[in-house]
Amino acid sequence: MKNRKSNIFRWVVFIIVAFIINFPVISTISASLKSAAEISRSPGLFVSEPTLQNFAVILEVTERLNIFAYLQNSLMASLIGSILPIMLCFPLSYAVARRGYGTNVIFPTVVNLRAMPLIIFAIPLYMMYQTLGLLDTPLGLGLVLAVVNLPLALLLLVNAINDVPYELDEAARMDGARIFTILIKIVFPICLPALATVFIFSFITAWNEFLFGLMLTTTKAVPMTVGASFFFSSGGGGVQWGVAAAVIVVASLPPVVLGILMYKHISRSMTAGAVKG
């Protein structure tokens, strides 16, 4: 009886905490299912007359607003910004972890770059991109996002490779394997959970980036974070809260779905010691 009461109490506390933490999400989803009249009349969480009209509004392609183009631009830029850091940092992490290269200068310098406010790089990046013709392109935005994700990728992958037993490298060398073979056939499969974690965190960071999306794009490569703001007052007469909530829900779906699908890989990475304090 005492154990049953204890379990009930735990569940009650869990539900209350989960509701408090997810209240902004629940409130946004609720608003997205309400008409403008119902939001004005009853701004609470309860939806008396659910409607998908807000979603129909944002999915309608016009000359000024195109949510599918924004989603495509964000997807392209986020994939570049999450895959490129892995390609660059994986061999570099092996050199740092196994040979000690850059442990005194390169490694701490790259990791500490993430602590700097990104606005510092705004003006030099804009001038450089203007010269190179990379303004308003998914490639240009993706390259910037890749640089933003480099410190996290390097830190996680160095820790992951440090957890791989060095004896495996020695055994492979005794069999005549070269560094590239060891890296691809031995270290890579063991580090897959950490690589998946880097990809997920990098993708979410790139998807949610607003500053560089606003600064480096104008029309052709506008990402979802910037494009979503165009819907807030698309019909005039102030902010349309239902439409704004609907576009926020749609913009949040890709990283949420990715996180849910790849949750097991994140758990394995953390339990394997790829993320250390």
Image (cartoon, rainbow, N blue to C red):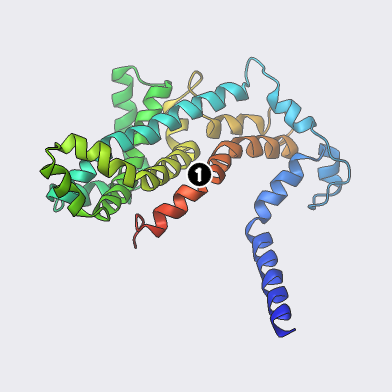
Q: 206 or 228, which is in the foreground?
A: 206
Query: For the point 83% across and 44% down, which residue is it?
Result: 40
Percent x, y of residue 96? 18, 48
Which residue lies at the image location 88% right of the left edge and 46% below the top edge? Answer: 48
Q: Quadrant of residue 228?
A: top right
Q: Quadrant of residue 23?
A: bottom right
The residue where tag 1 is placed is 262
Number of marks in picture = 1
Q: Is residue 243 visible?
A: yes
Residue farthest bottom in this picture: 2
Tell me if 48 is positioned left or right of 196 in this view. right
Q: Looking at this view, name the residue that lies furthest to the top.
A: 63
Residue 93 image point, x, y percent: 23, 45
Q: Determine whether, in the image, residue 185 is placed left or right of residue 79.
A: left
x and y percentages locating residue 13 in the rendered image: 67, 71
> What quarter of the picture does the N terminus occupy?
bottom right
Q: What residue type is disc 1 on? A: Met
Can you say which quadrant of the picture contains the C terminus?
bottom left
Q: Is residue 235 visible?
A: no
Q: Residue at x 57, y 29 (%)?
A: 227
The relative height of residue 211 versus residue 116 in the rendered view (above or below) is above
Given residues 266 and 75, the one toward you in this image is 266
Q: In what element is the residue under mark 1?
A: loop
**Residue positioned 48% across, 41% down in the render:** 204
Question: x%, y% of residue 14?
Answer: 66, 67
Q: Is residue 98 left or right of residue 210?
A: left
